[in-house]
Amino acid sequence: MNEALAPDVSVLVVSYNHVEWLRRCLQAVPHACAPRTFEILVVDNASRDGSREWLAAQPGLGRFLNQENAGFTRAMNQALGAARGRFVLWLNSDCEAGAGSIAGGIDYLTQHPEVWIVGGALVDDHGKRQPSALAFPGVVAVLTHCLGLKRWLRWKWLRGLAGAGARLTGSRYAASYLEHGAASESPRETDWVTGAFLLARREAVERVGGLDERFWMYSEDTDWCRRVKLAGGRVVFLPSMRAVHAVGASAGTSDVARCHYYRSMWLYHAKHDPQASLAHAILTLYFRMRALGPDPDLWRRLARWAGGRGPEPCAVPAPERNMAP
């Protein structure tokens, strides 16, 4: 690659069946990158809502039109393989990057060569901060998900109680989750940042490789940040790098998406967690308990797979093969 002709940043977007958000996402990119040079590479996972036709009419885009839903991770690797920029940005199709945000991230990485990744602050349409920079998950994270504790944290007194518990137990994950709404605008080092809005220097990709395709979607960003840190890079949360994020619009809420969420959680702990056996025991119990309630088929498949007695639980059936992400 001729470095002199390479753009400053390659903006990489995986698209599936959300043409309105995709339009908003791509239209915001020039303002978010200015005055930096950029290219946009979009991988469409067999959308059926007019996304492909809209993409075909847009000049200057790099397009990959998959004939089936390849999942987020494999599609992002397609884009990473074609990227020419000195920096690469993972950008969810349901994210609208703020003016100057991507350029600001590039400036930060340029000034801090020891940092390999920066992640931006994500907010909803009302400006409410979303969790986007956390400690690596362990058993506490599994319990938090399985017990549904997050929904209770909207009450201030419970957040305070949870914070005291996090300090008492030394849980870095719980503490980092509770801090996500803090108003501080100072950059801070973190374990991992969400792949919805993640900017990395090209050297990070060259050192650690692409995403682990065993994660069809979910947990691939946590895994990749962990690999970067193991290779000696630093990961920083940069609050001034902002985007509006419609949570879940790019992934959906189908059984397919839910299945991959828990499958990826299991795989992540198997790969990285020294307490994986405990995390897996909690997840297995959770699957079995959910299988006793409504819509048990998904949870039975997950329980059989977790117990080593069943095939891959998230194979996409023909009528649903384009439901997620």
Image (tube, grey):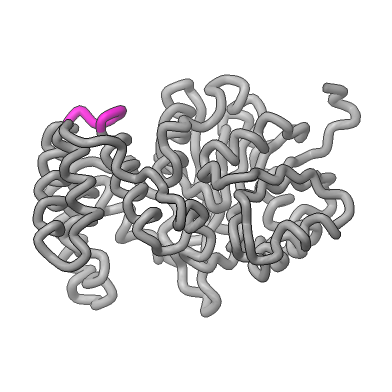
- Please tell me in which quadrant of the rendered image residue 192 appears: top left
Instruction: Look at the picture and state if 124 lies above or below 257.
Output: below
Residue located 84% across and 45% down the image: 37
Residue in front for this viewpoint, 191 or 254:
254
Percent across and percent down for residue 149 are 20, 64
Q: How many labels does the image show?
A: 0
Residue located 79% across and 39% down the image: 8
Q: Residue furthest front?
A: 318
Would residue 174 appear left or right of 316 to someone viewing this image? left
Residue located 60% across and 62% down the image: 17
Q: Is residue 271 found inside the magenta-colored segment of the image?
A: yes
Residue in front for this viewpoint, 280 or 230:
280
Instruction: Look at the picture and state if 88 lies above or below 125.
Output: above
Instruction: Look at the picture and state if 41 lies above or below 56.
Output: above
Residue located 13% across and 48% down the image: 169
Visible residue check, residue 280: yes
Q: Is residue 37 found inside the magenta-colored segment of the image?
A: no
Residue in front for this viewpoint, 193 or 24:
24
Please state the extent of the stretch shown in magenta in the rendering.
270-275
